[in-house]
Image (tube, rainbow, N blue to C red):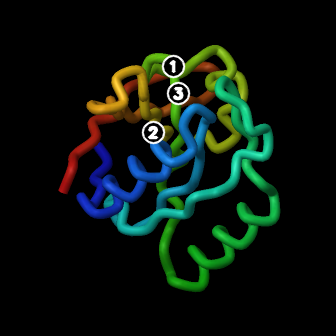
Amino acid sequence: MIQIQHVIYQIMLAHVQADYPLEACGFLAGQDRCISHIYAIENILHSPTAFEMHAGQQIQAMLDIEAQGLEMLAVYHSHPAGSERPSETDIAKAYYPELVQLIISLVDRSNPTVRAFSIANKHVEEVKLLLE
């Protein structure tokens, strides 16, 4: 299970809506499996079907997380026209297997769907996401 503060959840949804119809991405950090900080990171692919995080922004986020004594807990990204399940690409490119992957479907933009997954060695397991 992973928890996310309501305000962070809303900021994440606003970010993915603002980047629509392109995929949006970022890191989520906190402590004790409770997400309290968000780091929106530019998708340098500017694509509706794929994302790659801006390397410089990734490093800055990681340095800030460390400086604040937080732990990186999750990666999030949107699927503007797809489901909230990991795609084959998501599974193949799960570069942070220790992190939870939050996927936001914007198929129904007025009611986005968010699910969380653990993806390691091409094995996908849903993780319960609790909104605080």
Give the residue number, with chain letter if any, for mark 2.
102
The mark that comes first in sequence, 3 or 2, is 3
* Kind of residue at badge 1: Ala
Give the residue number, with chain letter if any, for mark 1.
81
| Mark 1 and mark 3 residues within 8 Å of each other at the beta carbon | yes
**Distance between mark 1 and mark 3 Cα atoms:** 6 Å
Given this view, does label 1 or label 3 mark the residue nearer the observer? Answer: 1
Left or right of 24 on screen, residue 82: left
**Distance between mark 3 and mark 2 Cα atoms:** 11 Å
Which disc is residue 64 wearing?
A: none
Given this view, does label 1 or label 2 mark the residue nearer the observer? Answer: 1
Report the front residue among 111 and 97.
Answer: 111
**Distance between mark 1 and mark 2 Cα atoms:** 16 Å
Q: Is residue 14 above or below residue 111?
A: below
* Kind of residue at badge 2: Leu
Which disc is residue 79 wearing?
A: 3
| Residue at disc 3, secondary structure | strand
Left or right of 60 on screen, residue 124: left
